[in-house]
Amino acid sequence: MLGVLASYSITVKELKLFFSKLQGENGQWGTFKYKAESDLLFAEHHKTLLYDGKLSSSISFTYNPCATDAQLCLESSPKDNASIFVHSPHALMLQDVKAVVTHSVQSGIHSIGGMQVLFPLFAQLDYCRPSSQEPDTSVCCTLLSFMMELLKNSVAMQEQVLACKGFLVIGYTLEKSSKMHVTRPVLDIVLAFSRYLSNLQNGIYLLKQLCDHIMFNPAIWIHAPAKVQLMLYTYLATEFISTVTIYNAVRRVGTVLQIMHTLKYYYWVVNPHDCKILKVIAALLKNSPQSPETMEVRRVFLSDMIKLFNNNRENRSLLQCSVWQEWMLSLCFVNPQNNEEQKITEMVYAIFRILLYHAVKYEWGGWRVWVDTLSITHSKKTCTHAVNVNLLCNHSTRSRL
């Protein structure tokens, strides 16, 4: 039986002293897997002496019974210098020990079908928990976070999401699910997706999917809290637009059309200074019974109109409405009986003054507005005078009888 055979290029005085300790548990050198492995406890100065690299670097050649191929002995000198540490006996040397093979989460997901097995979970966001009658709003954020970690650590997962149009599926399910799931944490994960994919070398196509089907999908965000919507569009208008890589991932014309569609059908606010709305308010005030409360409402309404007309010429679109003078005059008092009625009447005249000045100075054919105003005002005054005459005649007739 061939024992351990080693040749050193230097004289080692301590070699004889520690040779037995290097042999290992069964007296055979090389039975351990690591060259710095031993089941003996060494003092620190002994570890330094044995594993400072000088001893192993001075070996010319080494043969031992374990390093053989049939009848051929293999040279087994260490190829690098060992650090100053000692391994415990390797687990494979112990009796009845079996190797345990572990796999990554990505490998486990891939073995059951890949990333697409997660997408049906988004369709179950509205399911209630057994202990509650309401769905758990944290599930959506958890699923997106899990997907984020899978994409970060696996190129294969990125290719699977791209191939099966994963962001399209997620966007569709979020659009059909309850809007309570679109929370601030969900938005944070979506923005994290965007930042990661924009910095990823091969993430352009995934970023395009994310933008088209989630970030630029107004049906997902329109019912979210206002702060969530503001945070999303602030990111798109600042950090997102300043990223160079997005111009290769985002369709410029298509994206502009999509944003215009969003503005028109989701965020377009009807002008509150619309003549139909103003006419309805004026009619309600006119037909309301006279009281201090209704007089106060009338005063506030006229005050707001004066402020709007004074501060912005665009708000003077009331001039485009037909016979606006008629219902404006219905708010004043032709013959005011007290100070409150006098103030209301003066406010109505102030509005006429603003609008008629604007019509003459800025509107084409504005003199026609003056003519119409004089005509309507004259008829209003004449009707009021006729009513007063009839009332006086009736009163005189009853007095004579």
Image (spheres, helix red, strand yellow):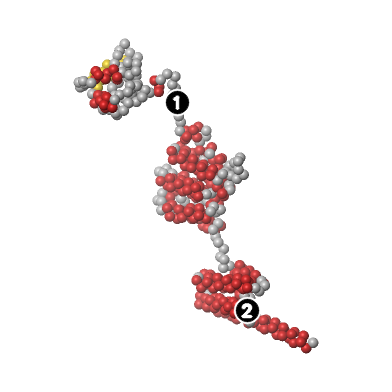
Asked if residue 318 shows in the view, the reply is no
**From this viewpoint, which residue is outermost toward the front?**
43
Disc 1 residue crowd, few under 14, some 14–19, many 20+, Cα 10 Å? few
Residue pointed to by mark 1 = 100
Image check: 334 left or right of 114? right
Q: At x 34% / y 21%, what residue is drawn?
A: 39
Q: Which residue is depicted at the point 47% across and 48% down?
A: 188
Amino acid tagged 1: Val
- State which quarter of the image contains the N terminus: top left
Pick whichever, 108 or 368, lies toward us.
108
Residue shown at the point (51%, 42%) measured from the top left? 142
Nearer to us in this view, 355 or 228: 228
Q: Residue furthest right?
A: 401
Q: Which residue has dot 2 on it?
A: 333
Q: Residue 111 carries which label?
A: none
Q: Which amino acid does label 2 sit on?
A: Phe
Measured as percent of width and height from the top left, residue 241 is found at 43, 53
- In the displayed structure, 210 sits above or below 101; it is below
Quarter of the image that includes the C terminus: bottom right
- The answer to whether residue 197 shows anywhere in this view is yes
Residue 198 point in image, percent of width and height = 42, 47
The picture places residue 3, in percent across and down from the top left corner, at 30, 14
Label 2's element?
Answer: loop
Q: Is mark 1 on a helix, strand or loop?
A: loop
Q: Residue 162: x and y, percent?
A: 48, 42
